[in-house]
Image (cartoon, rainbow, N blue to C red):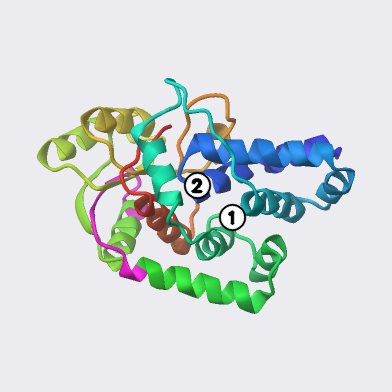
Amino acid sequence: MSLGDQIARYLPYLRRYARALTGSQATGDAFVRATLEAALADEAVKQSLEGGRVPLYRAFNKVWSSAYLEVDESADAASEHEAAAHNRLKAVTPLNRQALLLTTLEDFSIEDAAQIMDMNPDEVEQLVQQAVAEIDRESTTSVLIIEDEPLISMQLEDLVRSLGHDICGTAATRTQALEVVAERTPGLVLADIQLADGSSGLDAVDDILAIDSVPVIFITAYPERLLTGDRPEPTYLVTKPFQEQTVRAAISQALFFGTSRGFD
């Protein structure tokens, strides 16, 4: 496999991580582009990427840690979510969130995360514990679950309640989701992509966002299809089958950035 093919294989997941870390498609993708530009400009960095996924994330981490990027806030790209994300980033303490996302959303081991973050494993373990403690202190909200598989829906309900949040409703179709929102506006939406009647969770979320701006986390078996960077795409994506700690971290990060949208 060529270096280009190898990077292309991991690029959708790096985009997912960057967007979750920054709370924004535009900002996350800007850091990913800067990482690739740094690799092209530095032969040593370029050669290191032949080592696979860990070196790619390590190169991204160096850009994230050392650079401030001016992100295009044109009329097409600017949004309430972008403004909220940039404001929240000014106060963020990113290391613990980064450690948590690496070991949950991206499923790296503590040892791999330590290599990516240029730290020792004990330090990363401590950061993860700090991030979990932050989650436990977060304020609660009401959650709408859009999921057509009853067992998965119940699993998500149990997880959401275990984090101290309320369930404002569940829906298996686009129509049902709108019926729930008509009664009560959620503070967070967890949405599958393919729904029971052939309708789309993407369309259901568009309907909801036309009413109010709320954080959205999409749960799908094919995240790479929504991570091309070619169009407005979801900021928060969780892969099916999911681990509960992955959903937990995604919920925390989505709420961390406050008012947001499903798409940038």
Based on the displayed image, in which of its 4 quarters is residue 163 positioned? bottom left
Q: For the residue labelled by badge 2, is the local secondary structure a helix, a strand or a loop?
A: helix
Q: Hey, what amino acid is under mark 2? A: Thr
In percent of width and height, residue 208 lies at 25, 33
Residue at the image position 59 percent from the left and 39 percent from the top? 69
- Residue 221 vs 72, above or below: the answer is below
Tell us which disc is closer to us: 2 or 1.
2
Of the 4 image quadrants, the one containing the C terminus is top left
- Residue 217 vs 126, above or below: the answer is above
**Residue 97 seen in the figure:** yes
- Residue 22: numbered disc: 2
Residue at the image position 23 percent from the left and 34 percent from the top? 212
For marks 2 and 1, the one nearer the N-term is 2
Q: Is residue 114 left or right of residue 183?
A: right
- Residue 95 vs 21, above or below: the answer is below
- Residue 122 vs 1, above or below: the answer is below
Q: Which span is picked out in magenta?
A: 136-152
For mark 1, what is the residue? 106
Q: For the residue labelled by badge 1, is the local secondary structure a helix, a strand or a loop?
A: loop
In percent of width and height, residue 225 lies at 56, 33
Residue at the image position 83 percent from the left and 38 percent from the top? 41
Report how far apart the C-alphas of labels 2 and 1 lie in the structure.
15 Å
Q: Is residue 55 magenta?
A: no
In percent of width and height, residue 233 lies at 48, 31
As rendered, which of 263 and 168 lies closer to the eye? 263
In percent of width and height, residue 49 lies at 81, 48
